[in-house]
Amino acid sequence: MRNLKFITLLIFFVLSISIFANAQEVIGKLATAKYGQPKIDGEMDEIWKSTEEYLTDSYVQGTKGRVAYSKFRVLWDEDGIYIWAEVYDSLLNKDNTNPWEQDSIEFFIDEDNAKKTSYDANDAQYRVSFDNRQSFGTGASKEYFVTATKRTDFGYIVEAQVKMKTRKLKEGDIIGFDVQVNDADRFGSRVGIIAWNEVENINWINPSSFGNLKLVK
Ligand code: BGC
Ligand code: CA
Ligand code: CA
């Protein structure tokens, strides 16, 4: 009897340790954001040049070389994050009435990186088109989104600030984060969905598919 109690306790102990360890684990890709405040104007500030560059290389729809993609960088301050994205897209189109089927880029935020399977109060989906038209998915609104876009010879540039809704950010934090490029063709149909982390086109309903953004100084 005493033995059984001991074994039950031991199992419980081992289980709780492994659950705790899993909670600390980073699931999905990890990017780092450096501390700093750029000016949101579509011009590359000096500070952007010292940041790490990441690539959207998850071809959720479309194949590499045939559809658009993006190289992006991220900064942060206490109020939110900043994204610099260069979108490589040789044909820009906004004919579709659905904003996600126009040439555009999306940013996904999970402020506490809870990675739940449905959106909670601190998750949000933001979108901006190549001609700076903003649109908002679940949890997003214009008071938290500042953007500038610029057309270039390779496609377009997006510079954006996404403000946090429920908290201040600090060094060492990891938030849930993803980037998605939508590529429209000349008929106004979406032919490409190119993400940084996710693989199934479920980010808009399921934050567990976001990657991770670590805030460093
Ligand atoms: C998805 C679309 C979805 C839309 C809703 C996009 O990220 O790719 O399939 O309908 O979000 O906002
Ligand atoms: Ca700038
Ligand atoms: Ca396009």
Image: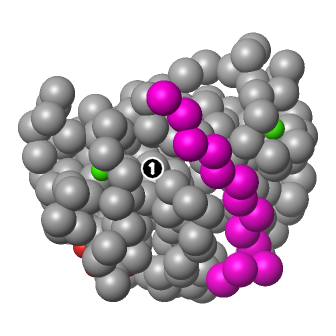
Residue depicted at 54% across the width and 80% down the height: 136
Q: Position of residue 163 (x, y in %)?
A: 77, 64
| Residue at the image position 38 percent from the left and 68 percent from the top | 94
The residue closer to the viewer here, 5 or 12, is 12
- In front of the other: 173 or 87: 87
User: SS for tag 1?
Assistant: strand
Measuring from the top left, give residue 180's x and y in whole percent. Answer: 38, 52
Q: Quadrant of the C terminus?
A: top right
Where residue 62 appears, as percent x and y from the top left, is: 11, 46
Q: Position of residue 21 (x, y in %)?
A: 43, 44
- The amino acid type found where label 1 is placed reads Val
How is the protein colored in the picture? one colour
Query: Which quadrant of the figure has residue 29?
Result: top left
- Asked if one can make out residue 215 in the rendered structure from this viewpoint, the answer is no
Asked whether mark 1 and ligand 1 are closer than 8 Å, the reply comes as no
Residue position for label 1: 179
How many marks the image carries: the answer is 1
Specify whether 40 is left or right of 91: right
82 to the left or right of 197: right
The quarter of the picture where the N terminus appears is bottom left
Residue drawn 56% across the image and 60% down it: 131
* Viewer-closest of 4 and 96: 96
> Residue 66, located in which quarter of the rendered image?
top left
Q: State whether residue 147 is above or below residue 17.
A: below
Residue 103 within the magenta-colored segment of the rendering:
no
Q: Which residues are magenta?
A: 141-153
* Residue at image point 72% right, 68% down: 145
